[in-house]
């Protein structure tokens, strides 16, 4: 990376843009599910009160489905990050570590600028 900040690196910019696109999609899915449930409950209560099986109504089923929507969204997020983002982030971190180590070898008494945060 040769002294350029990590946020100026082309790979970092590409994963940042992809992260924002995926975040917008996941947010639209989650909020859209919740909003449709609220709108159906408010404007077509007769449909939401239809019994399906025993005491289970369509409204209750759709309300419970909100947990499934959130679970699917979270699962897709984790899978997407592991597959598409983590390898690039590890590669960028390794390059940054190599650059910092080379800089320390060139100027051994100098303390590197900025904080160094560790991952969990």
Image (cartoon, helix red, strand yellow):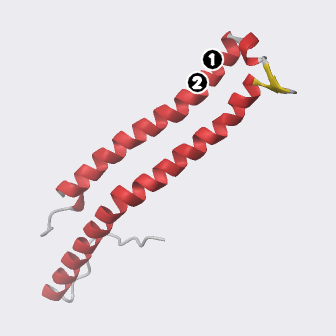
Residue count near mark 1 (Cα–Cα under 10 Å), binned few <14, some 14–19, many ≥20? few
Q: Is residue 101 above or below residue 68?
A: below
Q: Nearer the viewer, residue 64 or 30?
A: 64
Q: Is residue 30 above or below residue 112?
A: above
Task: Give the residue pinned by disc 2.
Answer: 35
Circle 1 SS class: helix
Q: Is residue 17 above or below residue 5?
A: above
Circle 2 SS class: helix
Task: Give the residue pinned by disc 1.
Answer: 39
Q: Nearer the viewer, residue 93 or 18?
A: 18
Judged left or right of residue 15, residue 68 is right
Q: Quadrant of residue 57?
A: top right
Residue shown at 17% from the left, 80% from the top: 103
Q: Is residue 109 above or below residue 45?
A: below
Judged left or right of residue 7, residue 64 is right
Please report contact status of discs 2 and 1: CB closer than 8 Å, yes or no: yes
Expressed as whole percent of the image width and height from the top left, the position of residue 52 reads: 78, 24
Expressed as whole percent of the image width and height from the top left, the position of residue 100 reads: 22, 77
- Count of picture labels: 2
Residue shown at 26% from the left, 81% from the top: 111
Q: Nearer the viewer, residue 51 or 72?
A: 51
Expressed as whole percent of the image width and height from the top left, the position of residue 110 reads: 21, 83
Question: Outermost residue toward the front?
Answer: 53
Tell me how far mark 2 sits from mark 1, CA to CA: 6 Å
């Amino acid at each position: 990376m040769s002294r350029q900040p990590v946020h100026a690196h082309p790979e970092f910019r590409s994963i940042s843009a992809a992260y924002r696109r995926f975040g917008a999609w996941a947010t639209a899915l989650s909020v859209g599910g919740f909003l449709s449930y609220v709108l159906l409950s408010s404007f077509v209560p007769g449909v939401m009160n239809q019994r399906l099986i025993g005491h289970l109504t369509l409204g209750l089923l759709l309300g419970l489905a909100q947990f499934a929507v959130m679970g699917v969204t979270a699962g897709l997020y984790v899978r997407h990050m592991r597959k598409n983002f983590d390898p690039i982030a590890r590669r960028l971190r390794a390059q940054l570590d190599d650059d910092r180590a080379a800089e320390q070898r060139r100027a051994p008494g100098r303390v590197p600028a900025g904080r160094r945060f560790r991952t969990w």
